[in-house]
Amino acid sequence: MSIEELSTEIDVFLLAEEDKVAKLPKGAIIVSDPVLQYYESLAPGEEPKQIFVANASESLRCVYPLINGSLKIESLYDTGSQIVSISEEKAMEAGLSWDSDIVIYMQSANKGVENSLGLARNVAFLFGDIVLYMQVHVIRNPAYDLLLGSPFDTLTESCVRTTKDGNKTITIHDPNTHQRAVVPSVATVWFGP
């Protein structure tokens, strides 16, 4: 099935108490993932359909959040992507672990299909003083290090300001503290497929 067939509503939820295993504070607001929501909606024993998403094509701007408290990663800002995803190499460098049972299938422009490696849950992203927790699909050898798709926009209620010279700033809202921050983006040289 195409990812467009999944629910367009993305669950956002509030932690009622501290999650010591995932190291999430009480009251943290977390965005879910549309693929994970689909898997959770299946009846016991029901076989999931293969889910296809388009490979990222081209993105011109990037930001540099601190991931998992350990690594700043060039992150392509792509509002056309339905997921947040990271390369296997950068996931390992950032010390992420992932659930290999949550797999999606990505179809490239040449109609080739490649599966993801799994889903890293509740990954901390630090933008200035704002910490966001997102679900991140791990991809083997993509043309990017990290891709911020629409779940990022949903969680942060982002607002992009583009100037005449092509510069973009992204104003984000912290759902936990209600703080706002302006995140500058930088042009990136893109060597996509």
Image: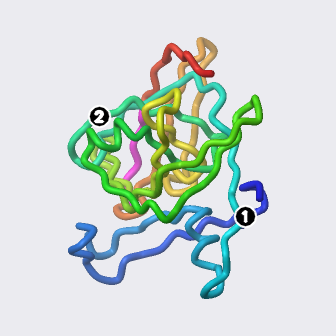
User: x, y (%) of residue 13?
Assistant: 48, 74
Q: Is residue 180 magenta?
A: yes
Near mark 1 (Cα within 10 A), the count class, few <14, some 14-19 or many ≥20, is some
Give the answer, above or below, for where 61 lies relative to 131: above
Q: How is the protein colored in the picture?
A: rainbow
Residue 29: x and y in percent read: 41, 68
Residue at far bottom of view: 44
Eye-nearest disc, 2 or 1: 1
Residue 90, x across and y down, in percent:
34, 37
- Name which residue lies at 52% across and 27% down: 143
Quickly name the residue at label 1.
6
Q: Is residue 12 above or below residue 111?
A: below
Image x and y of residue 158, in percent = 54, 46
Query: In the rendered image of this protein, does residue 95 appear above or below residue 78?
Result: below
As for residue 108 lying within the magenta part, the answer is: no
Callouts 2 and 1 close, C-beta under 8 Å: no
Q: Say which quadrant the C terminus sits in.
A: top right
What residue appears at the point 60 percent right and 26 percent down from the top-left corner? 59
What secondary structure characterizes most of the magenta part? strand
User: Which quadrant, please, contains the N terminus?
Assistant: bottom right
State the mark number for residue 72. Answer: 2
144, 25: nearer the viewer: 144
6, 104: nearer the viewer? 104
Label disc, if present, on residue 177 of the rendered structure: none
Question: Which residue shows up at 46% across the image and 52% down it?
Answer: 136
Q: Could you tell me which secondary element the residue under label 1 belongs to?
A: loop
Residue type marked 1? Leu
Identify the magenta region: 178-183
Q: Would residue 134 be found to the left or right of residue 71 on screen? A: right
Report whether 16 appears left or right of 21. right
Q: Amino acid at mark 2?
A: Lys
> Which label's residue is closer to the chain start, 2 or 1?
1
